[in-house]
Image: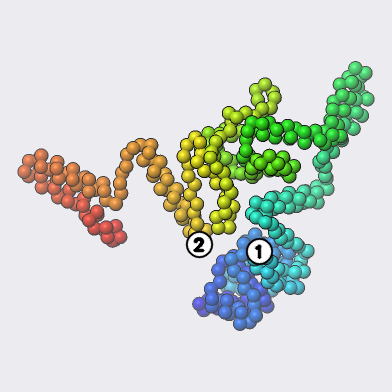
């Protein structure tokens, strides 16, 4: 504890009034900090601390040790800002750092009705930030919305004039064909509507996909009472397909070069409902048509307990699968030694008188561990 106090004194003498760490801070250390009015924050993410250090011109310190083999903490590793306050936004307590000294920085706080909406908002913001960063780095922008096709049209029409008379015609036709989608944006939407109509005509009432679904497609599905679920994991879709006797479809294209969607690729179940368990919304599929299936929902106090529970359930399922595959079970807890004891005692009776003794002693020795479980823990 003297070492800890000495380290805290070095930090306080350097003039620090806010201390943030990725590890924990015990009650005594908190007391030493709060007595002098220093804010101490524990369990911070390393990536957050690196961003704060970059904005405030601080240095991320992993140890107080210096090159002389001693410990030191100076003002050179500290950052500056005008204000640090703890604010409450909705149900969360946030520590806000305002007017950083080194460079300007901003944080985006996303709020939505549920986790699905927040995930979609986070992806959209991430894509927008990546586009902005790419523009600032390269100073070049490739526009969408048919801009590439329009630029190619201009280039090919100019290039066609340099060709011979007969070669100009196919080049000009190809250049005009590039403008079909930019001049007619409804072409893309017509293709999407046609695909959705094929799915609906096949009788599907639940659609799940690994990709996104835009608002217009959602509207087309909801108008006819079809449940559409986006951003599903591929492994989950494969399990659902196996349980419902469906086929995982990656494209509507068929061997004839057309697009089709039939009832043969669809699975069946009696009920699909959206249920709320704790803070999560789950889509439950009940009474699947092809084979019985079950989902195990684990709930615990923290992530460490949940990880341990998941490993235990995984081990139990692997044992059950191995038993069903091989139809053989090797029991633990000394069962093997006890079975050998029974076998060897019966075998000893078939031997000559003098040979029975070592066999019987060895059989009794096998029961030492099953009858005395403390043997496992002795040295």
Q: With 184 as the anchor, is 299 left or right in this view?
A: left
Q: Give the tally of numbered discs.
A: 2
Q: Tell me which residue sits at (80%, 49%) in the image.
A: 135
Q: Secondary structure at mark 1?
A: helix
Q: Secondary structure at mark 2?
A: loop
Q: Tell me which residue sits at (52%, 43%) in the image.
A: 286
Q: With 318 as the anchor, is 265 left or right in this view?
A: right
Quick one: which residue is furthest to the left in this view? 353
Say how the picture is coloured: rainbow
Q: In the rendered view, would you say 322 is above or below 28?
A: above
Q: With 58 as the anchor, is 363 left or right in this view?
A: left
Marks 2 and 1: CB-CB under 8 Å? no
Structural crowding at the residue carrying mark 2, measured as other residues with C-alpha within 10 Å and reported as few (<14), some (14–19) or many (≥20): few
Mark 2 or mark 1: name the one nearer the start of the chain: 1
How far across and down, in percent of the image, does residue 202 sit? 64, 31
Camera-near label (2 vs 1) is 2
How far across and down, in percent of the image, does residue 237 sit? 57, 40
**Frontmost residue, 35 versus 226:** 226
Reading the image, the residue beneath label 1 is 49
Asked if residue 76 shows in the view, the reply is: no
How far across and down, in percent of the image, does residue 351 sit? 10, 40
**Frontmost residue, 201 versus 117:** 201
Quick one: which residue is furthest to the bottom in this view? 35
**Frontmost residue, 288 versus 327:** 288
Image quarter hosting the C terminus: bottom left
Q: In the rendered view, would you say 369 is above or below 346?
A: below
**Frontmost residue, 218 versus 372:** 218
Asked if residue 102 shows in the view, the reply is: yes
How far across and down, in percent of the image, does residue 369 sit? 24, 54
Reading the image, the residue beneath label 2 is 301
Q: Tell me which residue sits at (37%, 38%) in the image.
A: 324
Q: Which mark is residue 91?
A: none
């Amino acid at each position: 504890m003297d070492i800890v106090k000495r380290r805290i004194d070095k930090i306080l003498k350097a003039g620090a009034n806010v201390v943030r760490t990725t590890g924990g801070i015990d009650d005594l250390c908190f007391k030493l900090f709060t007595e002098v009015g220093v804010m101490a924050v524990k369990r911070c993410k390393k990536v957050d601390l690196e961003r704060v250090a970059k904005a405030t011109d601080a240095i991320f310190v992993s140890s107080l040790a210096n090159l002389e083999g001693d410990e030191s903490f100076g003002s050179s590793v500290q950052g500056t800002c005008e204000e640090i306050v703890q604010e409450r936004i909705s149900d969360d307590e946030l520590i806000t750092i305002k007017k950083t000294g080194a460079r300007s920085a901003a944080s985006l706080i996303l709020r939505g009705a549920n986790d699905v909406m927040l995930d979609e908002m986070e992806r959209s913001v991430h894509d927008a930030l990546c586009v902005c960063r790419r523009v600032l780095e390269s100073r070049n922008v490739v526009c969408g919305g048919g801009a590439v096709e329009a630029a190619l049209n201009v280039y090919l029409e100019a290039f066609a004039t340099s060709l011979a008379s007969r070669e100009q015609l196919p080049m000009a036709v190809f250049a005009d064909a590039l403008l079909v989608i930019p001049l007619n944006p409804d072409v893309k939407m017509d293709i999407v509507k046609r695909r959705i109509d094929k799915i609906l005509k096949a009788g599907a009432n639940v659609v799940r996909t690994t990709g996104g679904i835009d608002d217009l497609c959602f509207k087309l599905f909801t108008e006819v009472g079809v449940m559409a679920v986006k951003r599903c994991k591929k492994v989950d879709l494969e399990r659902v397909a196996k349980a419902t006797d469906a086929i995982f479809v990656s494209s509507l294209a068929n061997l004839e070069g057309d697009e089709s969607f039939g009832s043969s690729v669809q699975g069946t179940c009696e009920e699909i409902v959206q249920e709320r368990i704790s803070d999560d919304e789950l889509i439950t599929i009940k009474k699947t048509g092809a084979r019985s299936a079950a989902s195990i929902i684990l709930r615990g106090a923290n992530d460490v307990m949940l990880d341990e529970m998941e490993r235990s359930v995984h081990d139990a399922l692997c044992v059950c699968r191995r038993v069903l595959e091989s139809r053989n079970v090797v029991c633990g807890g000394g069962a093997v030694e006890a079975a050998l004891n029974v076998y060897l005692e019966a075998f000893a009776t078939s031997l000559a008188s003098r040979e029975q003794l070592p066999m019987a002693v060895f059989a009794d020795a096998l029961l030492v561990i099953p009858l005395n479980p403390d043997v496992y823990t002795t040295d």
